[in-house]
Amino acid sequence: MNKNRAFLRRIPLHIAMAVTLLVLLFSLAQIVRCLHEKEQRDRFHAQLAHSVVEAAPQDTEQEHEGALPEKSEETVWPAPPITVDLASLQAQYEDVVAWIHCPDTPIDHPVVQGEDNLYYLDHMIDGRKDSGGTVFLDHRSDASMTDACSIVYGHNLRDGSIFSSLPEYSSQAYYDAHPILFYLTPEKNFVIDIFAGFVTQSNDRLYELPRTELARAELIEACIERSDIKTQTQPTVDDRLILLSTCSYAFEDARYVLAGVLREN
């Protein structure tokens, strides 16, 4: 009888141990899966970049180490430090619309555009399922970047890839070192002239895309008021804006948004 009672008393302990073991095994499996995904993602991206991306010859007068030319109506913006064979890329992956690049950061990715804003959250450009997804342009935006405001999304992965460096723009020093990005399309190359970076909620009105001059003015004002950084850029309602959006871990459903003006070079 005493043995039976002792055995019964140990049952909860055995169950707890079994549950703990299952949780540990599940967690280990998730870690292995994530590492395997990252390895495949990194290898695929490296092969992709090797096949379509080349370093561009740089005019020594245009080389820049984070510094920008004095801004004016006649500012000559630097040329992209890379060239991308987008025609070849689009022949393989029809949803590709651009390439985004920020020198000396992890941001160096093809940009796709799907029929909605869901598919590429967890798919690579070749259609493979992947939790890292792909950098993508909002399905409502014009791929030629002629809209008054466009949005580009990418995950903030803890492994440091995709758009994980965007929240670094909360630091003035980081902005000073990386004040521009490059957005290359089949038709034109653009400089993204950053003017604000801030944390916001996932249901912020900015995701509705401003359609009127008043809405654009309110968006610009709201971005600058909330910005973590100070810049020389003074956007106007006539400028074409671009918002780069990623997840933030500041609070639940937080987003980090980097706002810029599209400049043609």
Image (spheres, rainbow, N blue to C red):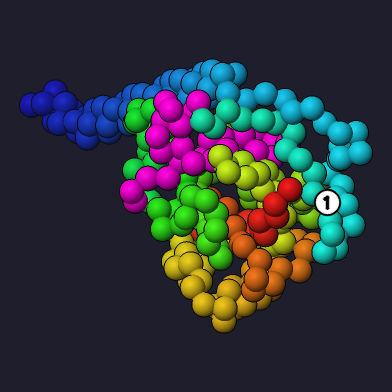
SS type, badge 1: loop
Front residue of 8 and 29 = 29
Mark 1, Cα crowd under 10 Å, few <14 / some 14-19 / many 20+, is: some
Amino acid type indicated by mark 1? Val
Residue 20, above or below 260: above
Q: What stretch is highlighted in magenta?
A: 88-116
Residue 154, above or below 244: above
Q: Name the residue under label 1.
A: 76
Front residue of 62 and 137 = 62
| Residue plotted at (74% across, 28% down) | 56
| Residue plotted at (69% across, 45% down) | 181
Q: Is residue 256 magenta?
A: no
Front residue of 72 and 173 = 72
Residue 16 seen in this snapshot:
yes
Quadrant hosting residue 95 = top left
Where residue 144 appears, as percent x and y from the top left, is 52, 51
Quadrant hosting residue 71 = bottom right
